[in-house]
Image: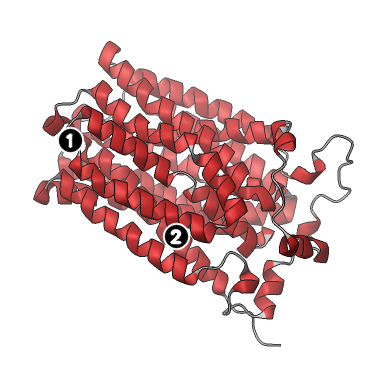
Amino acid sequence: MPPPTRVRVRVLAFAFLLAVITYLDRICISAAAPVIMDDLHLSVLQMSVVFSAFTLSYSLFEIPSGWLGDVKGPRRVLARIVLWWSGFTMLTAAARGFYSLVEIRFLFGAGEAGAFPNVARSFSRWFPVRERGRANGVMFFGSRMGGMLSAPVALFIVSRWGWRTSFVLFGFLGIAWAAAWFAWYRDRPEDHTAVNREELAWIQQDSTSDDVAARDARTPGTPWRTLRRSRNLYAICAMYFAFGYGLYFYFTWLPTFLIKVLGFSVLGGGVFAALPFLLAGIADLVGGWLTDRLSRRHGLRVGRCYLGFGAFLTCAALVFASTLPVPAVAKAVLLAMALGSADLALGACWAVPIDLAPDHAGVITGCMNTLGNLGGLLGPLVVGIAVDRWHSWTFPFYITALIYACGACAWLAIDPTLPLARQKPGLPRPAKTQREYR
């Protein structure tokens, strides 16, 4: 027997690069925020609105874009998404004031919506259950590398050529990715000429012959009624709301907090703004490996939910500890460790929807990411209001710690051993919920 090919590794490489570019484009505005505020004469509250304009549109279009990936396939949908957001990344350089900047960032968010749900849909076709946690971990390691590189690279470009140039340069990266993706990728492994029978058998090891035949025959309709009644879906959304609420502080206000509040220099602020993403990237790799290993040994509930509970609760404790009267360096390190702790569960976050319904992974992750980004919409606004009205940077951290603790509790309400097809009234639970690992 010839050895199986490893074309799915190249799919993962595309997902990794996509995550890097996504976060480069998304976070460069936070690194450039102090300069943009001075240049366009924006207040802290107005800059909060700019940050939240992206998040609002990103949230609104997540579910439609995820659904399109389920129906049309990620090849075409992702190419459209990346071209759109790259164009509006470059167009950000043309902003001349508060209103034009808000409009451009809103349209930028509408274009970027659905990127990660479509990658999740791709993973549902290209990776078996035992590899999905690691695949998501590697992809989000790319996102954190993009976040880590964004702050120092953007600050360097801004200091040399101005903030407008940084957006133009970052926009070109996405255009190159979209062209390569559309030319090489295929929505189904069996349609890719480089995949041999041995790799295809490995990819489809969790599917019965009926499952494969059904997927070949047609794209299954979206079970909207079942989704609306799914307690799993509500718990997943609540969990990810907490994750997004805390995450967006690092995307938006962290460089400003480090430089203007903690008193770091531009260079020091760039280093400590990159540190959370470095730790989070390492945690993504470790967490992706850990969730798959624990799931194989102890079942999906331990590997996904208990891991998520511990990671979120530790994050809440670290955020609270950063409010204590400790030196500025200690505060910066505690905040960096908090993001790393939350990201330890990120592979599990994105593997759970695929475990529940591989054929509807785009819609379910779209719902999850919508709530995550609504949390991200609220978080920067809370910071802006607290600083603008009460001159307090501590109060928002208390709220963040509380929300992460609630997210930890939401993890315990998720049952990843109950597939979506089994959540209809009157259907019994499967006798062996872990057959895919046996």
- 256 left or right of 141 in image: left
Q: Residue 243: x percent and y percent?
A: 50, 35
Question: Is residue 408 something one can see in this rendering?
Answer: yes
Q: Quadrant of the C terminus?
A: bottom right
Vertical placement of residue 281 versus 251, above or below? below
* Tag of residue 70: none
Vertical placement of residue 388 versus 29, above or below? above
Q: How many residues crowd around disc 2 within 10 Å: few (fewer than 14), some, or many (20 or more)?
A: many
Q: Residue furthest left?
A: 160
Dot 1 corresponds to which residue? 36
Q: Residue furthest bottom?
A: 1
Image quadrant assignment for residue 104: top left
Dot 2 corresponds to which residue? 16
| Residue at disc 2, secondary structure | helix
Q: Residue 33: x percent and y percent?
A: 22, 35
Residue at left 55%, top 59%? 135
Residue at left 33%, top 52%? 86
Q: For marks 1 and 2, give the one nearer the viewer.
A: 1
Q: Residue furthest top?
A: 390
- 296 left or right of 259 in image: right
Q: Are marks 1 and 2 in contact (CB under 8 Å)?
A: no
- 178 left or right of 215 in image: left
Q: Nearer the viewer, residue 287 or 198?
A: 198
Amino acid carrying mark 2 in the image: Phe
Q: Rounded to the nearest whole Å, what is the CA distance between mark 1 and mark 2?
A: 29 Å
Amino acid carrying mark 1 in the image: Ile
Q: Residue 424: x percent and y percent?
A: 82, 38
Image quadrant assignment for residue 92: top left
Q: Residue 220: x percent and y percent?
A: 72, 52
